[in-house]
């Protein structure tokens, strides 16, 4: 019996040099596995596709470089790579997605593969992520909730203790453990699971797409597991530029709103937003009273409230808009 097949996907957006380094690390860790690697340029339009193609050719790697032709975001780009399938036209047993600024440590990909092979009931397996400095990154989470929005926005010890089971970020696990969802910097997914629940929802441009995918898997009976033995070095935010954000971009608010409305409904999304606004106002008042600097994105609450109001208004307008129905022609109508 042949070993289970793996299709690894690295998504590039305007970081070809970094992507080639990630590919080099991935190729090293895929050696000896029944695996293929594809690199998808997510319509960078900056010469990335040509640079990646030349880099792969010069290195002599058996890697396909694909052009998505449209930047639909993280989920859409990875979907494009996964839909490409293996070079023989078949679907793999597992898909592995790796960020373009992530570098698998020794044995990391094999550890994910082995875990999924051994635990046939698990849908997704993700890695322990750390920075180049060795400091662990927070990549294991609970599913977002309205109470989680309140707790996260308030940042108040007594409330956090009261709502402990609603805190979204989990402490970095020291052992392999089941979690609600994982960041997609290094994640292996069972093809059977994706065949049942579908790929990433492409309505998410960036952020919340992994959350939604893991939630759909959990609802279908496929849990997600954090595999501590699998370690990956991650720089973080190279393509998104998140570390330099002056304000949170609209697509983050779009993704958050879509996640809550899709999974919980409009009323719940509105409640979650109101609780976040209340918690955020409380936090800001405390900082003023304590004369401490505000640790939050500029105008975040105003942008959050504005986005929710626009989303509700747009939905209301769509619901009220009359449908265009073709009227049968009558004898009095002109040609």
Image (cartoon, grey):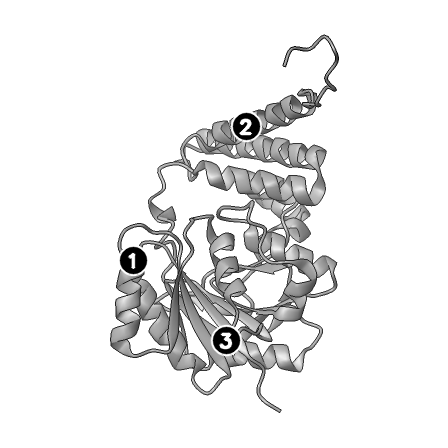
User: Can residue 216 be seen in the rendering of this structure?
Assistant: yes
Q: Position of residue 261 (x, y in %)?
A: 66, 39
**Residue 174 is drawn in which quadrant?**
bottom right
Of residue 196 and residue 99, the one placed in the foreground of this image is 196
Residue placed at 62% from the left, 52% from the top? 212
Q: Which residue is mark 1?
A: 48
Q: CA distance from mark 2 to mark 3?
A: 40 Å
Residue 188 badge: none
Estimate the spatial distance between the alpha carbons at disc 2 and disc 1, rounded to whole Å. Answer: 37 Å
- Under tag 3, what secondary structure? strand
How packed mark 3 is, by other alpha carbons closer than 10 Å (few <14, some 14-19, many 20 or more), is many
Contact between labelled residues 3 and 2, with CB atoms less than 8 Å apart = no
Near mark 2 (Cα within 10 A), the count class, few <14, some 14-19 or many ≥20, is some
Residue, x 72% and y 17% (percent of image)? 329
Mark 2, residue position: 305
Secondary structure beneath dot 1 equals helix
- Viewer-nearest of discs 2 and 1: 1
Q: Nearer the viewer, residue 90 or 142?
A: 90
| Residue 306 x %, y % | 52, 26
Report whether 125 appears left or right of 298.
right
Secondary element at image label 2: helix
Q: Residue furthest bottom?
A: 1
Up the image or down, 144 lies above or below 20; here it is: above
Using the image as rendered, state which of residue 270 and residue 78 is in the foreground: 78
Q: CA distance from mark 3 to mark 1?
A: 29 Å
- The answer to whether residue 17 shows anywhere in this view is no
Tag on residue 230?
3
State the image quarter where residue 267 is shown. Answer: top right
Q: Residue furthest top?
A: 332
């Amino acid at each position: 019996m042949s070993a289970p097949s793996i299709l690894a996907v690295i998504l590039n957006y305007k970081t070809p040099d970094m992507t080639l380094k990630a590919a080099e690390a991935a190729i090293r860790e895929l050696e000896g596995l029944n695996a293929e690697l594809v690199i998808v340029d997510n319509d960078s339009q900056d010469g990335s596709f040509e640079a990646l193609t030349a880099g792969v050719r010069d290195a002599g790697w058996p890697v396909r470089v694909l052009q998505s032709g449209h930047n639909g975001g993280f989920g859409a780009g990875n979907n494009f790579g996964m839909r490409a399938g293996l070079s023989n036209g078949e679907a793999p047993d597992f898909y592995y997605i790796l960020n373009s600024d992530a570098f698998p440590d020794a044995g990391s990909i094999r550890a994910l593969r082995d875990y999924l092979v051994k635990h046939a009931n698990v849908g997704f397996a993700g890695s322990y992520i750390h920075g180049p400095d060795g400091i662990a990154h927070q990549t294991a989470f609970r599913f977002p909730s309205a109470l989680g929005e309140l707790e996260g926005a308030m940042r108040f010890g007594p409330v956090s203790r009261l709502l402990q089971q609603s805190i979204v970020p989990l402490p970095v696990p020291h052992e392999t453990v089941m979690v609600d969802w994982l960041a997609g910097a290094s994640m292996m997914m069972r093809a059977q699971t994706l065949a049942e629940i579908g790929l990433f929802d492409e309505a998410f441009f960036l952020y919340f797409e992994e959350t939604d995918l893991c939630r759909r898997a959990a609802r279908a009976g496929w849990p997600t597991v954090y595999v501590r033995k699998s370690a990956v070095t991650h720089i973080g935010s190279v393509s998104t530029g998140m570390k330099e954000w002056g304000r949170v971009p609209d697509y983050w608010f779009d993704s958050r709103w879509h996640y809550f409305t899709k999974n919980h409904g409009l009323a719940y999304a509105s409640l979650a937003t109101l609780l976040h606004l209340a918690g955020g106002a409380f936090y800001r008042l405390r900082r003023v009273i304590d004369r401490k600097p505000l640790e939050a994105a500029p105008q975040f609450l105003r942008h959050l409230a504005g986005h929710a109001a626009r989303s509700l208004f747009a939905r209301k307008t769509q619901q009220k808009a009359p449908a265009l129905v073709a009227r049968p022609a009558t004898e009095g109508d002109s040609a």
